[in-house]
Amino acid sequence: MIVVSEYRGQCVGVFGLGKAGSATVASLVAGGAKVFAWDDKSAVADAASRDASLTHCHFKEWPWHELKALVLAPGVPLTHPAPHAVVAMAHQHSVPILGDIELLYRAQPQARYVAITGTNGKSTTTALIGHILNEAGLRVQVGGNIGTAALTLEPLGEGGIYVLETSSYQLDLVRTTRFNVAVFLNITPDHLDRHGTMENYVAAKCHIFARQQPGDVAVIAVDDEWTRKIALSLQSPVSSVASLTEVSGYQPLQRGIFAEQGTLIDATGDRRLETGNLTSISSLTGRHNWQNAAAAYAACRACGVAPDVIFAAMKTFPGLKHRLQLVAEIGGVRFINDSKATNADATSNALAPYDTIYWILGGKPKEGGIVSLSEYFPKIRHAFLIGQAAEEFARTLEGRVPYTHCGTLEAATKMAAAMAWQEKKSQAVVLLSPACASFDQWQSFEQRGDAFCDYVGALHAP
């Protein structure tokens, strides 16, 4: 755990007591701060009220004239669709608003920081970078949006490296944090209800480059129009390494780090170096993972790791749970858990590698639905619809893909397995890739994915 002593003897407000908020409270209390805390969710608030280490009361009752900071949970609206009332009160009393990553940085200023953002691929790239650095013998801790709260990480001090997945919400809450290596993967419409416009969403993501200094490195995967514009507009003295996979209609890079027909190329120096063939690594299946690998390679080179060490570590990367995770192969059918695909763009990466798909999808819908996935419809033998999005998705699939309303994930898993076994198609996969958030039926995509794994574990082939 990180001890935050900056506010010793002073008052700090913590709003939002989930995983990150609870860790923040513990870190501040350990550092001698007087903590006032609240969560709008009654069950969380009730649990916090039994914690004698903090003052638990509604934020309207906090001593705002004494507060030195408000530490905000990333999920609390900062600007759109309207600032939360606690944000408005902080502005009214000129109380600085920040997040847990900012506290980590202030508490561990001698460490180095590698941050990763983008709409998709963040978690895989974060985990891959952490794996490579660890295999290279460096002292590293991995956390942030990937699921491990920043302040639960171990103190590393000088020579240590924190590898942090950063969402747009978290980047909105950094104030002085400097990322020595900043990785920007891609950008597609997402979280617009929170940011208002694409421009605001992109601006939040671009906070990852703020305060970089000479010697720091910006890694930008220029595979979409937005990231290409960002790469061109990044006017700073930092060293910028653009990584590219293969993009239709875009001139491939002559210099940089990129994947060419699955071969990872390092063309940043005087000669072009072919570091290895990514198609041989099962945990990095799919063209989207080539982008992740190129970005991870660039970040690890910036940390001083040799090319051969990087690729050797990539070959032992176990992959990320809930992202194209092979759960089991039963009766000749593979069951793939891609619960982390919470939007259509992420699901496109799951549909691309397979040709005979029994697709489980649905949940709390995102803007745009699944219309953008039409090119993959010929690969889908049958769709099994669950959750709030079922009716909307059925309208999109009508006349193009046969579908069944299943209601629950458990029912969908059983129906998909039964049909796949009955049809006995070669290379068949039952794929959970919802293209939706989980919050209509589950607390998180992790819980949804774990449930799918349990349902698959209970199956028996005929």
Image (cartoon, rainbow, N blue to C red):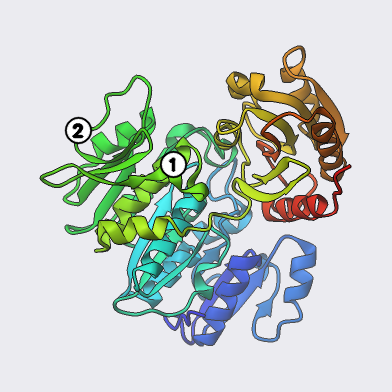
- Residue 348 screen position, x and y as percent: 57, 31
**Residue appearing at x 58%, y 19% in the figure:** 375
The C terminus - image quarter: top right
Q: Residues within 10 Å of mark 1 (few under 14, many from 20)?
A: some
Local SS, label 2: loop
- Residue 302 screen position, x and y as percent: 25, 58
Q: Report how far apart the C-alphas of labels 1 and 2 lie in the structure.
A: 22 Å
**Residue appearing at x 85%, y 49% in the figure:** 459
Front-lying residue, 93 or 87: 87
Q: Write down the residue under mark 2.
A: 254
**Residue appearing at x 40%, y 41% in the figure:** 291
Instruction: Identify the mark at residue 436; answer none if there is no mark.
Output: none
Amino acid at dot 2: Gln
Q: Is residue 116 visible?
A: yes
Relative side of 63 to 40, left or right: left
Front-lying residue, 49 or 120: 120
Q: Write down the residue under mark 1.
A: 279
Front-lying residue, 127 or 214: 127
